[in-house]
Image: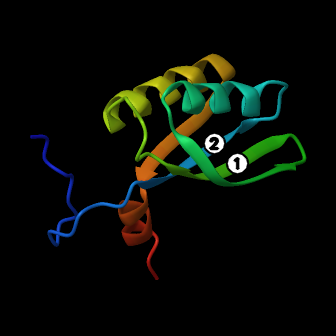
Amino acid sequence: MPQTAKTPSGKPLSGRAIVTIIGADRVGIIAGISAVIAEAGVNILDISQSVMRDFFTMIMMVDLSASDVSFDDLRERLARKGAALAVKVEIEREEIFKAMHRV
């Protein structure tokens, strides 16, 4: 039986993660990243993107619970697609993202 991933405090991790994309604006960024996410069986729950001058930024909340790939595999797939699109792509589980950005 597979073990459920847990937070450092022992609570089960939620099935959500935060994906951030930053780079020079160009055609195909949203399509490329969204395709990787869809192919992994991950659902986009919320998305925000903007272009500031020539810089593209996007943040997504995704649901990993129906995914058929591991978190690490998804991270690698996103990084490869980001490199192909010349953007930086990062993914963090929701709990880790919240802990890192707590003020």
Single out the residue that lies furthest toward the right. 53
* Numbered circles on residues, count: 2
Identify the amino acid type marked 2.
Ile
Q: How is the image coloured?
A: rainbow
* Contact (Cβ within 8 Å) of mark 2 with mark 1: yes
| Helix, strand or loop under label 2 | strand
Q: With 62 as the anchor, is 28 left or right in this view?
A: right
The image position of residue 99, as x and y in percent, is 37, 70
Packing grade of label 1 (10 A; few <14, some 14-19, many >=20) is: some
Instruction: State the residue at coordinates (46%, 53%).
Output: 17
Q: Nearer the viewer, residue 15 or 19?
A: 15
Instruction: State the residue at coordinates (39%, 54%).
Output: 15
Q: Which callout, 2 or 1, points at the residue further toward the start of the chain? A: 2
Identify the amino acid type marked 1.
Met
Q: Quadrant of residue 67?
A: top left
Q: With 84 as the anchor, is 31 left or right in this view?
A: right
The image position of residue 26, as x and y in percent, is 83, 27
Q: Quadrant of the N terminus?
A: top left
Q: With 19 as the anchor, is 51 left or right in this view?
A: right
Residue holding disc 2: 21
Q: Quadrant of residue 88?
A: top right
State the separation of the CA atoms marked 2 and 1.
5 Å
> In the drawing, what numbered circle is on residue 58?
1
Query: In the image, is residue 12 above or below residue 29?
Result: below
Query: In the image, is residue 72 above or below residue 6?
Result: above
Single out the residue that lies furthest toward the left. 1
Query: In the image, is residue 67 above or below residue 26?
Result: below
Q: Quadrant of residue 72?
A: top left
| Helix, strand or loop under label 1 | strand
The image position of residue 79, as x and y in percent, is 49, 28
Q: With 21 as the anchor, is 53 left or right in this view?
A: right
The image position of residue 27, as x and y in percent, is 85, 25
